[in-house]
Amino acid sequence: MQIHKYDTVIVGAGGAGMRAAIESTKRSRTAVLTKLYPTRSHTGAAQGGMAAALANVEEDNWEWHTFDTVKGGDYLVDQDAAEILAKEAIDAVLDLERMGLPFNRTPEGKIDQRRFGGHTRSHGEAAVRRACYASDRTGHMILQTLYQNCVKEGVEFFNEFYVLDLLLAEVDGVQRTAGVVAYELATGEIHIFQAKAVIFASGGTGKFFKVTSNAHTLTGDGQAVAYRRGLPLEDMEFFQFHPTGIWRMGILLTEGARGEGGILRNKDGERFMEKYAPVMKDLASRDVVSRSIYTEIREGRGCGPEGDHVYLDLTHLPPEQLDAKLPDITEFARTYLGIEPYTDPIPIQPTAHYAMGGIPTNVQGEVLSDNTTVVPGLYAAGEVACVSVHGANRLGTNSLLDINVFGRRSGIAAAEYAATTDHIELPEDPASRVVAQVEGLRNNTGTERVADIRKELQECMDTNVMVFRTEQTIKTAVETIGALRERYKNVSVQDKGKRFNTDLLEAIELGNLLDLAEVMAVSALARKESRGGHYREDYPNRDDVNFQRHTMAYRETDSAGNESIRLDYKPVVVTRYQPMERKY
Amino acid sequence: MSTPTLDKSSGHSEALDAAEAAAGHLITVTMRIRRFNPEVSDAVEWVDYQFPIDPKERVLDALHKIKWELDGTLTFRRSCAHGICGSDAMRINGRNRLACKTLIKDLNPEKPITVEPIKGLTVLKDLIVDMDPFFQAYRDVMPFLITKGNEPTRERLQSAEDRERFDDTTKCILCAACTSSCPVFWNDGQYFGPAAIVNAHRFIFDSRDEGGEQRLEILNDKDGVWRCRTTFNCTDACPRGIEVTKAIQEVKRALITRRF
């Protein structure tokens, strides 16, 4: 076992982690731990753009952006945080440009902007061009640019180091951050990273769904580690289903396709979004569009022999426009479906895309251990975190913004905190939990297979807690997940080795997915209303009196060792905008 | 089918009908995989796995079927599964490709499909190679914007034409398919390789960058661009469709003319 000592340790090397690293490396001795290589992170799969009211192509301002974010999040957004997001968006984009990001340009040479779902002028009057973009690979360009600048700054990476535990220790009655424990994939060796500050930036949890835009590796590792250490998870019932995933595969086709003029159509060729969102039509918020698609499918107007999808129609757009603005997604249609988007509409269905919930933080990225108490030295940013700027439904282009604004903030805050404090003593036998977990899985001789349990989990989640939910379906999910968690205790891996044991890795990841799926379902069951991405057919209206509040889920273990989930609630921060009916 | 408001009211193309057909008929495929695990044995072994699969699935799906249903010890890297993250470059039927961007039906699946690690980098286990030399070459070309003087308050201006000049090389996902297809790289581990040159190109031809001379000097080295023998393997291998050989030629020309 090796012990390393750093001021700041960052867990994850996607957009949030690398944006944080650029700041913290300038200010403190920093290590970045990633279970992949930095450029493999899923930030690179983001396509359409990054929102900022630059007003380069038409009138816009950060206040409109704040309002759109709050309304998009169905009034579950903490409005102080949304205001910071929208205000700092402008510098966040300009910072990236100065770091070298090759944005598309206007005829005057400025950063070009395009329309995106839910982004409007004058509080909902009409769509506004707010998304700064680099073709349809904006996330790829952000990830590359941030990695390039990490190279420039000499950021120290530990590639293929999988963080399995967070070390907290009590000092003078306060739980403080002591470091993390990581598993080195290449060797199977356990490493302790002692640190004054730790930033979780490990991304989302989408792989508990079957049809998802998420990478295989998005298994909620950071959330699960924090949760098992007794920290709450906020608003886990809110998961975004992106309207346009490639049918059955879930591969993302950017909302930018509709921003460029693409239209959703049912089997009759009807532009059905006109019925559901008369003003914004195909550019309504994602939760609204995904529900509309499934309503069409349920009412028999879906496409194909099984009527289980609709079309994204780009055929009326000039091929030159598709080549210039949407080259990647049109190539996906050609590669994976064998169709030509110049002439054929693309079969699509909603795809599990983004966790609005996560580890609760304040606007400095500091992690909270309850509604108000900060854990000294612990930070989180990006999809792993819940600030909450996305509330019940994130607007497109606000996630690339989130990782830059709050990645930067947490990187600065963590390094500044580290400068003011000493390392605290590591707890006794710091690797004990991880050793027990890893060796327990390696040596288990049970009869259950990881792939079987994961498949059943994904099918259960798609069937029961996707776009439409009811008391009955959620209860079914809770029961099924509970049974799968029992079976997981009997899971065995075939690869017993130390070297690149990805069989073992997948078993650990599945454990994380199971824990988080349960938190999601239990949180969803208790929320007896419909808001944003959480739609209850048995409670179809938003209930601001009882539920304009954040869910806080805690893992509890009783004296007999039985685990349960305790739910608590946290008030929403409301500054300027009182809840209104949400129409697009 | 009648689609009154769809531009193409004539109906569906055969391609769309085929895409929408229910799960295709399954075929039996043989995946012939080069296995190596020094923890167990120093010997390399080719192992055949035979199983039914929908030919519209990806090679990555086939590898997952093996790992998840037949043999959990098979080891490979992957993440996004749609050609963006660059994790799963492999040599498939003798050609470098991404496993997640290659469909079984396009590989002549009546015969065994061979899968082996990319060449020229040390194999660590099965399909996993040591990527550190590859990323070191990338870092050596100073792959970041270099500017002089004060930072502007707003964005630097750049014309759409100037932006277009280096568009192709911004697509690189650092998968190493190009570099590990290059015979010069196979024979001499010192050569920077196509991917590093592509990433140098991305900055040399960016009108905002002022580090071109420094980068050109690095690439003028004996292990730099002049080692390229223009075999076009790299261009053929690139899963992002980057004209890699052309980019290398442009860097060579810039070295001669010092104009870029």
Image (spheres, helix red, strand yellow):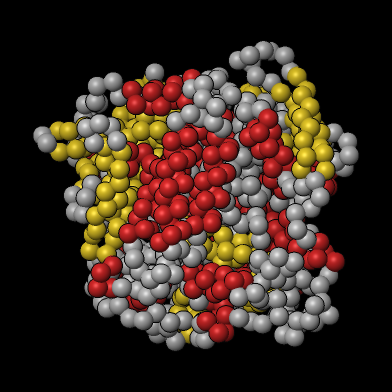
Residue A88 placement: quadrant: bottom left
Q: In x, y percent, where is residue A216?
A: 56, 44
User: Above or below — where is B227 with respect to A122?
Assistant: above
Say above or below: A314 vs A218. below
Residue found at x 35% / y 69%: A529
Is residue A265 toward the left or the right of residue A543 in the image?
right
In the rendered image, the residue lying farthest to the left is: A172
Does A19 appear above or below B70?
Answer: below
Left or right, residue A304 beside residue A222: right
Residue A401 point in image, percent of width and height: 43, 61
Examine the rendering and report whether any part of residue A111 can be seen. Answer: no
Q: What residue do we see at 66% from left, 27% from top?
A: B71
> In percent of the image, x 65 and y 19: which residue is there?
B37
Q: Position of residue A113 (x, y in %)?
A: 53, 73
Locate the N terminus of chain B and report the quarter of the image it occupies. Answer: bottom right
Q: Quadrant of the C terminus of chain B?
A: bottom right
| Nearer-the-camera pick, A83 or A112 | A83
Quarter assignment of residue A499: top right
Residue located 50% across and 60% down the image: A466
Depth check: B249 or B167 in front? B167
Question: Quick check: A185 above or below A223?
Answer: above
Foreground: B93 or A370? Answer: A370
Work out whether residue A508 can be spotted: yes
Left or right placement of residue A250 versus residue A197 in this view: right
Q: Residue A517, position in %: x, y?
A: 43, 48
